[in-house]
Amino acid sequence: MAKRIVINPITRISGFMEIEAFIENNIIVDAKTEGLLFRGFEKMLVGRSPFDAVYFTERICGICSTAHGVASTMALEAAMKVIPTEQGRYLRDIIHGCEFLQNHIRHFYQYTTPDFIKLPENYPLYVTDHNDFRLPEEKNALLVKHYFESLDLSRQAHEMLAVLGGKAPHNHGVFIGGITTQASTDKIIKIKSILNSINQFIRDKMIPDAYTIGEYYQDYYHNGGGYGNLLSYGCFNNYAELGTLYVDPLAYKDGSIRPFYPSGISEEIDYSWYSDDTEPYMDKPKAYSWVKAARYYGIPFETGPLARQWLSGEYRHGISTMDRTIARVLEAKKITEVIGVLLENITPDVSVQKEYSIPEAAEGEGLIDTTRGALGHWIEIDDRVISFYQIITPSGWNLSTRSGNNLKGTAEKALIGTTIQNSDNPVELGRIIRSFDPCVSCQLMYIQMVGI
Amino acid sequence: MIKSEKTICQRMKQIIEESESNIKMLFKMPCIYARTSVLFELSANTAELNELCSQLIENENRQVQPTQSNITIEQLSQFTGKNGNPAYVAVNGIVYDVTNNAAWAAATHFGLTAGKDLTDEFASCHAGHSILDKLKVVGKLI
Amino acid sequence: MIEKNPGICPMLNASSGTAKNLIEKIKSEIMRNSLVKRDLIWLELTGCSGNIISLLNGSNPDFKFLITNMVNLIYNNSLMAAEGEAALDALVNKTGSDYILAVEGAISTKNNGLYNIIGRWKGEPLTALKAVQLLGDRASHVIAVGACATHGGVSAARPNPAECVSVQSILKRKVIKLPGCPCHPDWFLGTLAHILLYGEPELDDRDRHLLFYSMLIHDRCPRRSYFDNGVFATRLGEKTCMFKLGCRGPVTRIDCPVRQWNSYVNWPIRDDTPCIGCAMFGFPDSMEPFISYDTTRKR
């Protein structure tokens, strides 16, 4: 007889989710990941000015707002046939890079480490419900110190973002053509200076800390694997002169890497709370989540830092809970290097803005890999207003529900087969799920789209 | 409610008398709290004066209407503030120019757009007429 | 008409009474042991959880100072170590004693609140709606943080599919409102500091903390002279007045021009973009369009 375990809330993620798992002989035999927040952005966007999509969609998510600004801007540029200048792209990608750093530092220290290190319990916030803490006292104390130090660094990552983006979260800088303002030398040097501190912190503390955790939790290199299918839309890539600084659009399956084709994306709602005409419908039999099921040629794929590190050849140690965390901190370092290169190539004081006009009717897509993975925005314009908007987020891939062919979502698959040490305190579940960096705030979408 | 010029002037005179006696009192008052309370009264008086003056100006505006252009609702709909056109809105039959009114950035105001008769919307948000007095009148809505 | 004593000149107030001053005051109170740390519950509800991220961006006071010297942070979904029912224990056990409640996000009321479940307690879903009802009345103070909590914000944007409402719509008690998308860390920390030191701060008729929300952006805008002289930008990136592009500074009461964001390095207008009125009631629907070009052209 399988034992049913429910964890809700899964804390230390953005948004709200529940894990439901069934355990037999200490092994997870079935699992569901359930997104528990619905807002309906795609419906809200209909009828609004296309220009407003950039700032509006940023409000989908508080921790990765820039990602939505970037994807939305790219979709608009495609619809309006605006090709941003290389300088515009560099500047926009610098802002996007700052968001990566803010995210990865906060995700690693504030969201991930409390699973593995014991934070001071004189803070009510850090009282825990289990005792599987394996680091020796000295090392634990060092990581606790870094937990608090990291707050300064993630804050500075947003400060760096605001230098070009005006404010964060929900910046104003990312816009059609690149960014709104110009990079004057005082701004460039300010960013360089902050970047330098962040780079040092990542190199000297964050990466060693991740490996320290890995050392004491070796078993986590052997669980949470999932399908092992990896996918990226590409980011920091395909510059006219600089080429690809990070990763191109690629997909990995059955041991081989192939180019990624956007036409393979689909999204299914068989197990999500939507009716056939895409209205919210919570009484639907079998359905259990607001998250839908993103698929690539019908198959679930994992997306995010590990996928990118793997596809770009930077890190191919393995596909597991711990590898995801290691890949995230290594990627943070990679991003500081990418921002460094982009900064070197900035021409100061260049304005990339024009007076734009909205076409009578048009459509466009914006696909970009962002902190948590592959993000897509699709826009249709009719009568100069938005007539259709579609968003598929990284969590739509990683935290997806089952699909029509009954293939489980990527994280669901990753949970199954895991050995649970103590079924009264199943810490393994949360640790595996957090390695995907779920963002349920983002998962609040509506409209089914098959074969865009 | 439109008051006649005579009623307005009578009330103004009354307020000025009250104010003068208040000012005299102020000179003699030693207590700071009492002074504050009289000052409040004075301030209320000036506010009311301002209101009354506005009404006078508005009456004036009404009178000059015939000499200004008559604007049909169809003509009004051209004045959206877009593509080089000024931004006009109509309230209670009078057409105002909001092209450079700070609260009408990009010819929009709290979700409302220019080129329309906004009488009902105005009534639901702005009591009194003092805001309208500051706007340039361009004509009468017919 | 002047309806109540306007108090100190808001200009003076803003320059002398910053959040930082309040924090300095707190520091000295702590030194003298006269400040008692109180319990804080921070609920994330129907929204983007961006206000807690913004709070982490606070500098002097920063997050560590907040949880070490100002409050015991009892519950926060994004940051707490515990998970599942053990996490909710902290919340449910709190209802008997003194605490300050901060809420970010709106409250989805559709389907009896089931569009936003924040946890499961004894097998039953705890909706955002139920959580606010449970904790709202018994808190010593309720602070609505950010646009969604104060007036529905983006979560309630038309056609409002999740039927989101503000915190005030659910509670009959006084709710201090700190609109903004997100809320600046100083606006929250300054308000909290005031509560800890002196009790409820002075609020305007819409329950906003006057210290931060008393003046229009337009009145302190560094580009005001361009407005007065009719010099208007026709695209983003220009250094003149962005009124014709749709700037909502003239209708938005908040101190962004003097405070600025993210360790005080920048703010939207300095970034050559219009204010989109994110700190004003009615955002986003009443503040749109955010950016227009067809009003900038000359005849």
Image (cartoon, rainbow, N blue to C red):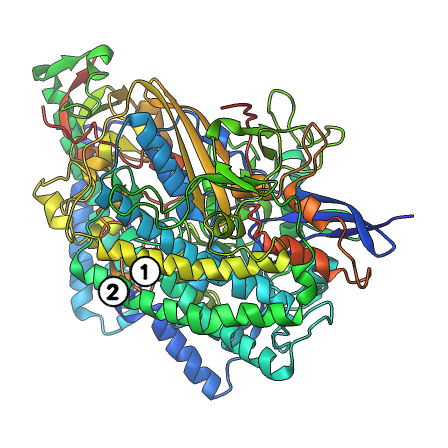
Quarter holding the N terminus of chain B is top left
For this orientation, the residue located farthest to the front is A256
- Across and down, in percent, residue A5 comes to 80, 52
Q: Are marks 2 and 1 in contact (CB under 8 Å)?
A: yes
Category of crowding for the residue at label 1, using alpha-carbon neighbours closer than 10 angstroms: few (below 14), some (14–19), many (at least 20): many
Quick one: A103 or A172, which is closer to the camera?
A: A103
Query: Does the rendering let one see residue B3?
Result: yes
Q: Along the horizontal axis of the image, is B46 left or right of A305?
A: left
Callout 1, which amino acid? Answer: Met
| Chain under numbered label 2 | A
Q: Residue at x 35, y 60 (%)?
A: A337
Give the labeled residue for mark 2.
Answer: A190
Front residue (pair C17, A82): A82
Residue that sits furthest to the bottom in the current view = C32
Element carrying mark 1: helix
Q: Position of residue A181 (x, y in %)?
A: 21, 48
Which circle marks residue A160 in the picture? 1
Q: Is residue A172 above or below residue A47?
A: below
